[in-house]
Amino acid sequence: MRRPYEDDETQDALKEAVLYGFREEDFRFERTDYAHIGTTQAPLFYEVTAIYEPSGVEHTFEAGHGRAWVVEFVRKLRMQAFGKPSLD
């Protein structure tokens, strides 16, 4: 189940989006936790979905221990995978 998500990494992602001409308020982030099956401790893994509100385009990134989802988010911005920034 996806739920709203905000932390230091989402703030970093928003700063990067602004550098590419997007507005912070145009993005929303949601988190989906992976279910852990078993009795041993496991590293925390989850998904972060970035939603570009003006177009509804969304991309999901693996996150958690050892993951750098913000780097992948920036790569998508660079590729214009969310589209071009809204100019208003």
Image (tube, grey):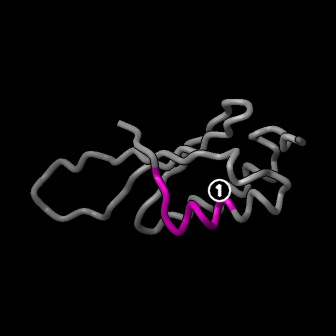
Q: In front here: 88 or 21?
A: 88
Circle 1 packing at 10 Å, graded few (<14), some (14-19), many (20+), is: some
Above or below for 72 versus 82: below
Residue placed at 41% from the left, 67% from the top? 65
Above or below for 18 versus 81: below
**What residue did someone put label 1 on?**
72
Q: In front here: 55 or 58?
A: 55
Q: Is residue 31 left or right of residue 39?
A: right
> Residue 74 appears at what percent x and percent y?
72, 58
Residue placed at 61% from the left, 61% from the top? 70
Q: Is residue 1 left or right of residue 50?
A: left
* Quadrant hosting residue 58: top right
Q: Residue furthest right?
A: 87
Amino acid type, mark 1: Glu
Residue placed at 48% from the left, 45% from the top? 30
> Residue 26 appears at what percent x and percent y?
70, 44
Q: Quadrant of the N terminus?
A: top left
Q: Is residue 12 magenta?
A: yes
Q: In front here: 24 or 36?
A: 24
Looking at the magenta stretch, what is its main secondary structure? helix
* Quadrant hosting residue 10: bottom right
Above or below for 88 versus 15: above
Residue placed at 73% from the left, 34% from the top? 54
Q: Is disc 1 placed on a helix, strand or loop?
A: helix
Q: Quadrant of the C terminus?
A: top right
Q: Which residues are magenta?
A: 5-14
* Quadrant hosting residue 24: bottom right
> Residue 7 appears at what percent x and percent y?
48, 64
Q: Is residue 68 magenta?
A: no
